Image (spheres, rainbow, N blue to C red):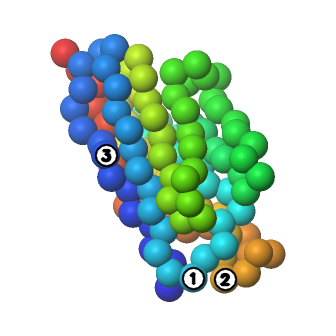
Amino acid sequence: QVQVVESGGGLVQPGGSLRLSCAASGTVFIDVMGWYRQAPGKERELVASISRDGTTNYADSVKGRFTISRDSLKKGYLQMNELKPEDTAVYYCNIRGGPNIFSRTDYWGQGTQVTVSS
């Protein structure tokens, strides 16, 4: 059974930084790892993603401030710099993959709260 766990959220002042971590357990080949966020009253949106070959994709609102990376087959990060109040949301890690390299199942973490406020 695949489990996804995020960590690293918290309260930070505007202009500050946070680093979120995502770790997957179980037998899983990851095709794409992505970070999504959902603010109160808004739909969940893609923040950044990184594919197996290292190709990255960012929402326009975070380009130049956030960096997604992977350092192993089952662990990744979202470095968030120059945080703004509008970045406040619950951040979710998504893994698309499965028990073999052709799998394309979505697995979600439980979410971690990021609050940007003075």
Whole-percent x, y for residue 45 in the image: 56, 40
Please give the label number shown on residue 27. Answer: 1
Could you tell me how far apart the alpha carbons at marks 3 and 1 are, in whole angstroms? 24 Å
Q: Earlier in the sequence, mark 2 or mark 3?
A: 3
In this orientation, which residue lies closer to the viewer: 28 or 37?
28
Q: Residue at x 68, y 57 (%)?
A: 32
Q: Residue at x 76, y 75 (%)?
A: 101
CB of mark 1 within 8 Å of CB of mark 2? yes
Decide: few, some or many residues near mark 2? Use Cα within 10 Å; few <14, some 14-19, many ≥20: some
SS under mark 3: loop
Determine whether, in the image, residue 96 is placed left or right of residue 111. Answer: right
Quarter of the C terminus within the rendering: top left
In this orientation, which residue lies closer to the viewer: 69 or 49?
69
Rendering quarter of residue 29: bottom right
Q: Residue at x 63, y 30 (%)?
A: 59
User: What residue type is disc 3 on?
Assistant: Gly
The answer to whether residue 17 shows anywhere in this view is yes
The answer to whether residue 44 shows anywhere in this view is no
Could you tell me how far apart the alpha carbons at marks 2 and 3 are, in whole angstroms? 27 Å
Rendering quarter of residue 20: top left
**Residue to which mark 3 is pinned:** 8
Decide: few, some or many residues near mark 3? Use Cα within 10 Å; few <14, some 14-19, many ≥20: some
Please give the label number shown on residue 88. Answer: none
Please give the label number shown on residue 99. Answer: 2
